[in-house]
Image: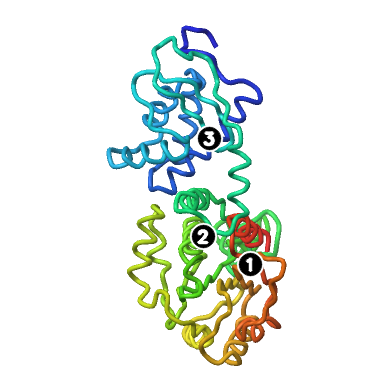
Amino acid sequence: MSEDAGGPAATGEDAGGLAATMTGFARTLRAAGVGADHERTHALLGALRHLDVTRPADVYWAGRLTLCAGPDDLPRYDRCFQAYFGGRAASRRPAGAVTVTRHTLALGDEAGDDAGEGEQESAPGSASRTELLRHRDVAALTEAERAEVHRMLAMLSAGRAARRSRRFEPAARGRLDQRRTIREALRKGDVARLLRRTHTVRPRGVVLFVDVSGSMAPYAETLLRFAHALVRSEPRATRVYAVGTRLTPITAELRHRDPGTALDAASRAIPDWSGGTRLGEELQEFLGRRHARGDIVVIASDGWERGDPSLLGTQVARLARQAYRVIWVNPHKGYDDYEPLTGGMRAALPYLDDLVAGHSLAAYEDLSERLAHA
């Protein structure tokens, strides 16, 4: 890249790191409600090839001009830029150096045009700090640390395993499609070829029950943010219910693109925050009105059942006969000395396919992988 084009361009490994960083930034913007789709992200990467990526102002304005779809996106963009790159939003005046890492661009202090030009500030410990946060119990985090974990949850790639649908689509191979073959023969007056069809595939459904009782209060918000990531990823294949003293569907509230807005709406819809848990009765209500045939059922609870544990066991057994898999997420499972001693856990355990941890970002990432490869 010539000096006339604006400065040095990233090449080789640096270019790959820049692309990964800016793609992650675009995911953060989408989670915050900014329309930073694939086409806009591609435009940003193209613009950065002609700019000096060591200048925060260049990165800031390139992103603002390519990723924002309208005036409403600008405040969200500024907040996300500040949070994602670990510093304040860049101004029109060139600032100090930018260091591209996996999650961070370290912004230097404001300086003159020649001050700090081309110098890079390293961010020692930023990667290790992120790794530590991934494995820490969210109940023990500070507000700032919890906000960072929630930001990373918003970027979680919540893929979904595929399942065969009952519907069919035309295909080069597969079973004979008699109707289409006969229609074409009648139209042409001759059987020119045999037409075939095959089953379509669709994402496997997930039914998530989130315990919002008092004993789960330290984990409820993080679980709901994980639920938001699932709904955003596959809105038609995900159903979310809050469980406490009553069963409350909250899927519609979690469909909003902005995590904060979605959680506010879900909070208003849940009437029994920090109460008791009657999970057996609520699963019985769910199975009386709905079903989970072929779906993955995820129950996020610590198993402290106020109702009859035997009823909970009976309902989990009914779910197991319907569902593709039943996964129980217990925050206490993340500790080595954990044993499923509560009445609810003992009753449900024989019918579970998996009992997994739910206390940290790493645990939610592992759960997401299970859902993607079930």
How many marks the image carries: the answer is 3
Q: Which residue is mark 1?
A: 178
Determine the residue positioned at 56% across, 29% down: 100
Question: Separation of disc 2 and disc 1 at Cα?
Answer: 45 Å
Q: Tell which of 270 and 275 is nearer to you.
A: 275
Q: Is 340 placed left or right of 206 in the picture?
A: right
Q: Which residue is mark 2?
A: 226
The quadrant of the picture occupied by the N terminus is: top right
Three-letter residue code for mark 1: Gln
The quadrant of the picture occupied by the C terminus is: bottom right
Q: Tell which of 8 and 307 is nearer to you.
A: 307
Q: Residues within 10 Å of mark 1 (few under 14, many from 20)?
A: few
Q: Which residue is mark 3?
A: 104
Q: Earlier in the sequence, mark 2 or mark 3?
A: 3
Q: Residues within 10 Å of mark 2 (few under 14, many from 20)?
A: many
Q: Under tag 2, what secondary structure? A: helix
Determine the residue positioned at 69% across, 72% down: 338
